Image: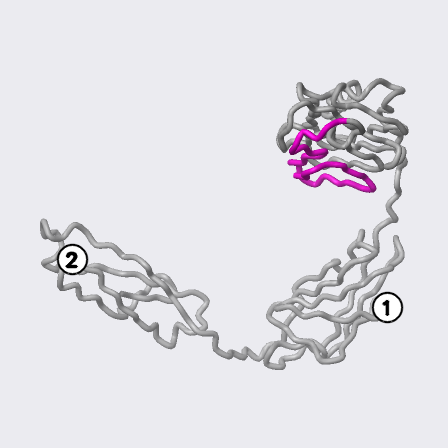
Amino acid sequence: MEYSLDGSTFIPLDTYTMSSPQTWYDKTISLPAECNHAGRVYVRWIPDNTSSVVGSTPANDGTALSSVYITGTQAAFNDGLAPTLSSSIPASAGTGASATGKVVLNFSKNVQIAGGTTASLGTKTLTPAVSGKSISFSYSGLNYNTSYTFTLASGTVSDVFGNTLSGPVTFSFTTMTRPTVTKKTFDFVVGVDGNFSAALSAATSASSSGNRFRIFFPNGQYNIGATTGNSNQMTTINLPNVSLIGQSADNVTLYNQNTTEGISSTATLYFNSSANNNYIQDLSLKNNDYRSGVASLGRCVALWDQGTKNIYKNSKRFHKTLL
């Protein structure tokens, strides 16, 4: 076994003597002190090609090197240098910073901060949180499109050995322009522009744009099972970015009237795995079991959602089992 600090000059370190074929030999070898704190250490194994074992048959069928572990202990090492600021979030002179967020300072090594230290951001006083090489300062309530100066006093940041950053940390950044909300009209009003089947057809045609498609239900009862359901009146939606919005949760009901029971075949509304980023608000989903005068069939669900990032706000579901 040999080692090197430059990858070119290798120095013998130790040897393995394998006296018997087809046998594993374990060994622990210590690297010399000059390897401590080295930026890179190379280790290699060189065979003794003069050995009588090499090439012998049938006992020797090859040599394998396996389960090599290089371990060490973390020793205190003081380089005498203070940490330096590597980067910050927001960046110095940066623009578009959030009005609520964090100032994060990233340093060249693990740091600590003097007890009781605070920083200033405009007129705000910020409290630090240290994690490894980073110090973060949470803030909120900044004005939009405004320049702010962050200041952390000198002599407050050091490494674990007390090597202290002498100068202050100070820089300025500008917050983002206030976002504007553009009001959208509904893309389809059920009962005005057509039934729910026509609404889904329109949403399918528009899906290639990648934009959200908004469907509105005025107050009323909607048997979507009869309109868009399969043979058991389960309506399947496989579209992303669709919003179903009712006039009110108490007065808009989407329902079906399935004839057989089963968790995977009775849902009033079924979002399959392609139906992602959908939104339902202010409407109720009712399964057949809960409609007046209809006997219970057994296991039935009002909503079956296998998509991701779907949101339900102020919506109601009447069911036996929710998946």
Residue 205 visible, this angle: no
Label 1 neighbour load within 10 Å: few <14, some 14-19, many 20+: few
Residue 208: % across, % down: 71, 25
Residue 105: % across, % down: 70, 65
Say which residue label 1 marks.
Answer: 124
Measured in 3D between alpha carbons, the distance from the residue under mark 2 to the one under mark 1, in whole angstroms, is 73 Å
* In magenta stretch: residue 145: no
Residue 207 visible, this angle: yes
Query: Magenta stretch mostly in which secondary structure?
Result: loop
Say which residue label 2 marks.
Answer: 49
Q: Is residue 240 positioned above or below 41 on the image?
A: above
* Residue at image point 89% right, 68% down: 123
Quadrant in the rendering for residue 110: bottom right
* In magenta stretch: residue 295: yes
Of the two numbered discs 2 and 1 on the same chain, state the one appearing first in sequence: 2
Q: Is residue 75 left or right of residue 148?
A: left
Q: Which residues are magenta?
A: 294-323
Residue kind at label 2, given as amino acid type: Asn
Residue kind at label 1, given as amino acid type: Lys
Q: Is residue 9 positioned above or below 301 on the image?
A: below
* Residue at image point 79% right, 32% down: 243
Secondary structure at badge 1 equals: strand
